[in-house]
Amino acid sequence: MHKVGIIGLGSMGGAFASQLVKAGYQLLAWNRSQPSHTQLLNAAGITLVDTPREVFGADVVLSVLSDDESYKDLFLKKGLIDAIPEGKVHVVMATISPDFVQRFAEEHNKRGLHYVAAPVLGNSLLAQSGKVHVLASGEIEAVHNAEAMLRALGSSFRYVGLAPEQANIAKLAVNLLLNNAVQSLAEAFALTEKVGIEKEQFAELITQTMFSGPAYQTYASAMSQEYFHPAAFALEMGAKDINLALELAKNHGLQLPVSKQVSQCLDNAIQAGFSQYDLSALLLAQQHKTE
Amino acid sequence: MHKVGIIGLGSMGGAFASQLVKAGYQLLAWNRSQPSHTQLLNAAGITLVDTPREVFGADVVLSVLSDDESYKDLFLKKGLIDAIPEGKVHVVMATISPDFVQRFAEEHNKRGLHYVAAPVLGNSLLAQSGKVHVLASGEIEAVHNAEAMLRALGSSFRYVGLAPEQANIAKLAVNLLLNNAVQSLAEAFALTEKVGIEKEQFAELITQTMFSGPAYQTYASAMSQEYFHPAAFALEMGAKDINLALELAKNHGLQLPVSKQVSQCLDNAIQAGFSQYDLSALLLAQQHKTE
């Protein structure tokens, strides 16, 4: 398989496309708005097509739209799903709700199409350097058909389970940890700064000892260097993900008190005008919270 | 300097004592209650003395009591501080409130004694294998006198600042991150378990990708293996530390909404009977939270 389709060339989709080109794939690509750098794309081996239907000339197509609504609109309302030839594999890489994944996968099955869920862990900066972690769930054979391509996108690949929503659930739980960690960092940085500890010193202290993983490294570094914009992972996307996790918890009768409070902090940061800022801007919102 | 005094042989103090013996130090030790294994201690090169005053036969004495009250009681009310010969270095390794540290350090200065704050990052299991991280603040010369001994206790050593409370503040901020991280893990494990993802699978997923640091490794492993008792770091100590951090924030006019909610979760877990359990038992408390 050397030809791959891709729908969505935003910050994540664009990063994936460039990784695939590097790995030697030919790409058929469609984006809702016309990218401005068409010639550059063509030169790189990416063929931009006029309709999303044409992308399914490839046997495996990956899509990276932003949310449930975008998928419902393009595939169901506008009927793209009915125009896809039987037997194609659709790899959905977006973080969408587990409930919708179940329904969307069924719509694929009914039409003889194969649905693979493959959300990734990591922001668009990590995606650009092929350092995201890929999760996948769905029918084993369909996942297998997409595996080489998915491995080209990141530094690790994990098969999470047969039910297509499993990978999305795992991703939501990881992003719940991430959102909580970043808000906690915002509180710790706001506190240490108030009492006179240098941000760089505190960042070094935590990331060289107990909190040395990539999540804390990324955001401790962003906060200590006051990097808040443009977004590697937009704050509004963080809010979307944590709300999906809270909805899932509620559907299972589970209360998540701290995650709920984190969601509130994200909402407040959005109200304060930081929705398009990086998740690290939770620090900016936190710095204005006084008793 | 080959002779060191130590006050407090609890889970942390005992671990430090054994590291110092391994490093070739002779120890003069005092504990509030008589340890049951006196002969073993003597054989190991630890001399148990009958009064805390005798410990100050050594030029450098480290102490590991549990909280502000224990220090106030022993050193101030019972007058130990007035019995210490001039010029001695007292290394306080407990996590106590920054306000009390300021006052306690002044009481030392007035009497010609040297106060060094040296809290550590890491629980008693890490302390037993010399893997804690040591923070230190106070007069440079006094810290220098204790440095070789402090380096023998852990895998890293950091000088945080001249003001004696600085190391305690940094430690409180790290423990705030820790408490928030463990409660967030409890919520993520409770959620993934409800929807049918195996605990071991989720633990592997997070600790091999975005959350690979020791804090998450320790508690993801404890939760997935259902290790809740006996405590490597008691839940009630977590509650104490986060309340100290919240008090510090309040004194500086700062509101920390998520940390406050985590403190509430710790209080609820204590109410539910988990105060002497490991911090990982936040998962047990979380599993009973339903909407």
Image: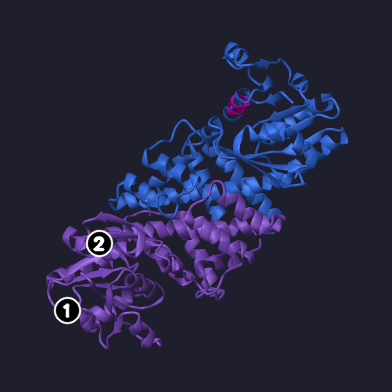
Chain colours: A purple, B blue
Q: Position of residue B127 (x, y in %)?
A: 56, 33
Q: Which residue is mark 2?
A: A147
Tell me which corner region of the image, top left, top right, bottom left or bottom right, holds residue A63. bottom left
Label 2: how many residues lie within 10 Å, few (<14), some (14-19) or many (20+)? some
Q: Is residue B169 left or right of residue A51?
A: right
Amino acid on which disc 1 is placed: Ile
Above or below for A133 versus B10: below
Amino acid on which disc 2 is placed: Glu
Q: Position of residue A222 (x, y in %)?
A: 56, 64
Main secondary structure along the magenta-highlighted residues: helix
Q: Position of residue A14 (x, y in %)?
A: 38, 75
Tell me which corner region of the image, top left, top right, bottom left or bottom right, holds residue B63. top right
Q: Is residue A166 left or right of residue A236?
A: left
* Residue at point 25%, 68% (across, down): A91
Q: Which residues are magenta?
A: B15-20
Q: Is residue B16 magenta?
A: yes
Judging from the image, mark 1 belongs to the subunit labelled: A
- The kind of secondary structure element at disc 1 is loop
